[in-house]
Amino acid sequence: MSSQTSQPCTFERECEAVMIPSGDVVTMPPGTAGYMTQALGGSFTVFVDGNLFRVAGIDADAIGREPVL
């Protein structure tokens, strides 16, 4: 999987995400808008409201991507 730079994305369903760098797990509600800053190694980094979050590849469909198993 290659790197992606600042593509708009919206959470289409409720999804757990890990806040970077604290590691806190949060639940993103549907309709949350942000920017996908990276797609690398089977996970996605999303910038939302000034914070970075890691979305697992298995949950990629929540941000409009193909799930990475």
Image (cartoon, rainbow, N blue to C red):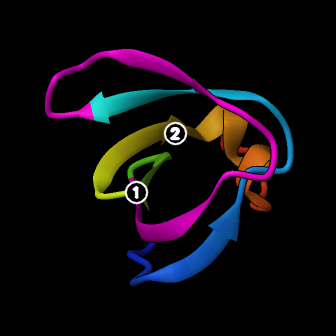
Residue 22 among those drawn in magenta = yes
Q: Residues within 10 Å of mark 2 (few under 14, many from 20)?
A: many
Label 1 SS: loop
Q: Residue at x 49, y 46 (%)?
A: 42
User: Is residue 38 inside the magenta stretch?
Assistant: yes
Label 2 or label 1, whichever comes before in sequence order: 1
Residue 69 in view (yes/no): no
Indicate the amino acid at tag 1: Asp
Question: 37 or 24: nearer the eye?
Answer: 24
Counting from the top left corner in percent of width and height, residue 60 is at 69, 47
Q: Which residue is mark 1?
A: 49
28 relative to 33, above or below: above
Q: Is residue 13 left or right of residue 23?
A: right
Q: Give the left or right position of residue 31, taking residue 48 as reference.
A: right
Please identify, in this view, whether the residue under mark 2 or under mark 1 is nearer the observer: 1
Q: Assess disc 1: are there few (<14), some (14-19) or many (≥20) residues with their C-alpha within 10 Å of its C-alpha.
A: few
Count of numbered tags: 2
Seen in the picture, residue 47 relative to 61 is either above or below; the reply is: below
- Give the residue number, with chain letter if any, for mark 2: 55
Picture layout, residue 34 above or below residue 52: below
Q: Position of residue 4 (x, y in %)?
A: 44, 79
Residue stretch rendered in magenta on the structure:
20-40
36 vs 62, left or right, is: left
Which residue corresponds to the image point at 14% horizontal and 33% vertical from the top-left?
A: 21
Residue 62 makes an appearance in the image? yes
Q: Quadrant of the C terminus?
A: top right
Q: Where is residue 16, by image quadrant?
A: top right
Hey, what amino acid is under mark 2? Val
Q: Main secondary structure of the magenta part?
A: strand
Residue 33 image position (x, y, % from top left): 64, 62
- Which residue shows up at 75% across the image and 61% down it? 65
Give percent across and percent down for residue 59. Answer: 70, 35
